[in-house]
Amino acid sequence: MSIFTWFDERLELKKFKARFLVKTFPTHPTFLLGELALYSFVTLVVTGVFLGLLYEPSTRMVSLFGSMVPSAYASVVKIDVLPLGMIIRRIHHWSAMLMIAAVLAHLMRIYFTSAYRKPREINWLVGLGLLGMSLLAAFTGYLLPFSQFSVTATSIAFYVAKSVPWVGDWISRLLFAGEFPSEGTVSRFFFMHVMLIPAALAGLISLHMLVLVKQKHTEPRSNKNRKEAQGGRRLIGIPVWPEQSVISLSFYLFFLSLVSLMATYIPLNPIETYGPPSPGTPVMRPDWYFLPVYGFLKLIPGDLSFSVLGGKITPETMGGVIFPGFLSLAAALIPFLDQWKEPQHYIVNPLHRPFMTSLGAGAGVFLCMTAAAGYIDLLHVTPAKMTIYVILAPLVAWGITYTLLERYRRKRGIHVKT
């Protein structure tokens, strides 16, 4: 009796292969964006296990090279001097960057090709949840080195949480274990970073895959005629095993090579340069994925505040709570505002959707402009002028894109709803 037969008698591997491994996967390269996010998550988990075994989530003072520093900071410095320690920490860092970028690019592909339409509204919301959880994972990881840079960056989020009307004190104490920084803040963030958020990410990824298997991928519209010629087969592509599995493995090896090169040649924020927390406030800016919120905060006048039903609305509330909350709500409502009665199984050409495509282009320019607002001190632009640019640039981008696409549509005689 072979090993395969022994396992097949107990686990029914042949039935599993016949049901799942013969499923069709589309060959369009943009579908690999979702796999890139998955590979990033796997790499984050593997490297995170290594880092978690050596990291000490505590602020107790210990001796490091003759100086007394917090143990969290000292443990990260010791990781960096270990053989391969710094490389693995950099791989962890850049994998997080790539995961956020991949999820964002994946959502952009779905938006511009209308793949969020019926019956895929649920997976659109799951994708937004994955983006949100990825950002939370990055945020909680910010504090763990406990350097002057990370403490300063995290303190901004503390005051934002504290500014939430009516429940700000309760939320800030829950997330930050009291006033920031307190003795329990690092351990609280460590728990969220290595246990709570990864579990939520794993659950959302599993839910996304289950829904995807049930509904199947969207496919290029050119497959419609091929499908009719082949007797109405639902999806045209390659089977998961062995063709797609080999492609996925090759792509993962390419991803590992890319992130290893990035880790080798692109440094992180040098915690030894910033040093442990001290009374001084370093000049710092968040990573690119938090720049729109940071830039929006810079545009709001510091003395602008008012009360609503006993709750105080401050600049931190407007820039750190209302602004990202509005963006999240607007993104979540897209599938329900873009009504489509029939099930959408084919990719829609963005050039055939003037309004939605131009709206997406305008939103992208808006986010880029708010990110640029985080550098107004280097750009030598006043907040008032930058606010005008933030408003006008998206409107100009939307108007130009819509005009060009509408002319293209009329010239080609394309129906708006295709």
Image (spheres, rainbow, N blue to C red):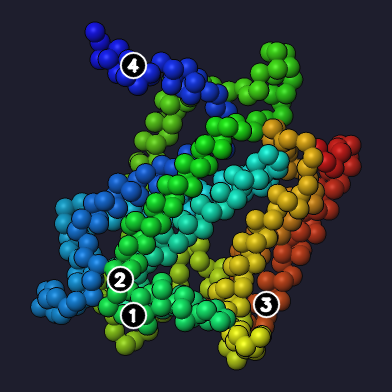
Specify few, some or many for label 4: CA neighbours under 10 Å numbering under 14, 14-19, or 20 or more: some
**Sequence-wise first label, 2 or 4:** 4
In space, the residues marked 1 and 3 are separated at their CA atoms by: 33 Å
Question: Which residue lies under the disc numbered 1?
Answer: 181
Does 307 appear above or below 1?
A: below
Specify few, some or many for label 2: CA neighbours under 10 Å numbering under 14, 14-19, or 20 or more: many
Specify few, some or many for label 1: CA neighbours under 10 Å numbering under 14, 14-19, or 20 or more: some
Which secondary structure, mark 4?
A: helix
Specify few, some or many for label 3: CA neighbours under 10 Å numbering under 14, 14-19, or 20 or more: some
**Sequence-wise first label, 1 or 4:** 4
Q: Toward the viewer: 257 or 329?
A: 329
User: Nearer the viewer's eye, disc 1 or disc 3?
Assistant: 1
Which secondary structure, mark 3?
A: helix
Type of amino acid under label 1: Pro
Type of amino acid under label 3: Thr
Instruction: Give percent across and percent down for residue 218.
Output: 64, 33
Residue 265 placement, left or right of 14: left
Instruction: Give percent across and percent down for residue 381.
Output: 61, 80
Which secondary structure, mark 2?
A: helix
Question: Which residue lies under the disc numbered 3?
Answer: 387
User: Nearer the viewer's eye, disc 2 or disc 3?
Assistant: 2
In space, the residues marked 2 and 3 are separated at their CA atoms by: 36 Å
Question: Which residue lies under the disc numbered 4?
Answer: 8
